[in-house]
Image (cartoon, helix red, strand yellow):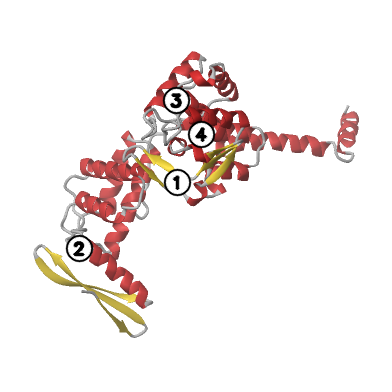
Amino acid sequence: MATIDKRGSTYRARVSIKDNGKYKLKSKSGFKTKSEAKAWAAEQEVAKNSNGISMNDSQLFSDYFESWYKLYKRDITENSLRWYARAHAIIEQYLPNVTLANLNRTILQDFFNKLGEEKAYSTSSKLRMYIRAALKNAQYDGLISKDPTVGLVITGNEGKSKDLKFLEEKQMSDLIELMQDIPSIERTISDQMILTALYTGARYQEIAALTPSDIRPGLISINKAWEQYTKSIKETKTKTSNRTISVPIQLTNELLDWSQDKTKHQFIFSETGDTPISSASPNKYLKQHLEEIHSPKIITFHGLRHTHASWLLSKGVDVQYVSERLGHSSVNITLEVYTHLLQNKRQLEEEKSINLLNGVGNFQDKIGQNLDKNN
């Protein structure tokens, strides 16, 4: 049972913790409010009652990391959970005998140096973020006194070029034309998913979850997502991912026709009606179609989302609108993802601006007069 008491202007919380078969009192002081003290005590009670994080700093860091993410990272997507499990496996491989008490900046820097020789920079960066969060928790619980992730230098391979993640306009046009030449009634479910992704920029999980009630003439409502690993419906990635996307009315007419043909199906993109097709199928068909049109780039289904966004930005569509259409939580995410494209567009806009400014006033006349004088 937790106890909260006031000590001067701050509060102290105390919790009885079982450690190696014996109970000991764990306390933490300095909380500005009683609510903060209660919240901390509640976290410790959860860990105690769920056989959560051990309070022994001699445990292996890999064991601590595993128990930490399984206790505190419950409300995350299956994909994120797999990333934490992958991080745990990497820690076990590279730091097999390192305890929480012995972990220091030198060991971690050596760990990231070795990791950088084999993994992409993005992987090393994400792993540092996960390890830092776990060690912050250990520091908060008094298991370590300092954060050993401070000042670490992260290296890694460049990974796949961003240019390979989306189709250029010609390949996009050829792909659409190839599939639209097939009568809609003869298209595969994967083909229809590919077209929907190209015209909406929606994620696989969002498209797979579509039901007939989500389709209206010229509009597609994104309000849920399909988790193919747990075979369940979940909320969209963020609150801003709930959105209504305007599309050509021909697309929704085709989707509505599909819905009528599958009156017993809960999901539009389904063979059985009970579950949507997996992402493997549209990825397989996409690869075949790209090879058929002799595309120099072979992208994944998710690359269709990048293709949609990149094409809109290249046509001068406002980045704020593109961000909303993609369901990004902020325009900053859109700017970060498509910065390479926007930089190229900025150079073109800069040249256009200079040309326009040169035509204002008498700059051109003066340039001509100076040239005449020099001659």
Q: Three-letter amino acid code at disc 1? A: Thr
Residue 132 coordinates in the image, percent (x, y): 33, 54
Q: Quadrant of the C terminus?
A: top right
Image side of residue 228 versus residue 48, left or right: right
Quarter of image, res 174: top right
Lower position in the chain sequence, tag 1 or tag 2: 2
Nearest the eye: 178 or 98: 178
Tag of residue 327: none
Of circles 4 and 1, the one toward us is: 1
| Residue 15 rendering spot, x and y as whole percentages | 21, 72
Quarter holding the N terminus?
Answer: bottom left
Q: State whether residue 183 is above or below residue 227.
A: above
**How far, Cα to Cα, is label 3 from label 2?**
46 Å
Q: Mark 2 points at which residue?
A: 49
Q: Distance between the residues labelled 3 and 4?
A: 15 Å
* Helix, strand or loop for disc 1: loop
Callout 3: SS: helix
x, y (%) of residue 276?
Answer: 39, 33
Identify residue for label 3: 190
Identified by mark 2, the residue type is Asn
Is the C-beta separation of discs 4 and 1 under 8 Å? no
Rate crowding at label 2 as few (under 14), some (14 to 19) or many (20 or more) other CA atoms within 10 Å. few
Q: Which of marks 3 and 2 is in front?
A: 3
Disc 1 designates what residue?
236
Real-space Cα separation, disc 4 to disc 2, in angstroms: 43 Å
Question: What amino acid is labelled 3 in the image?
Answer: Ser
Point out the frontmost of discs 1 and 2.
Answer: 1
Q: Earlier in the sequence, mark 3 or mark 2?
A: 2
Q: Earlier in the sequence, mark 3 or mark 1?
A: 3
Question: On the image, numbered disc 4 is attached to which residue?
Answer: 305
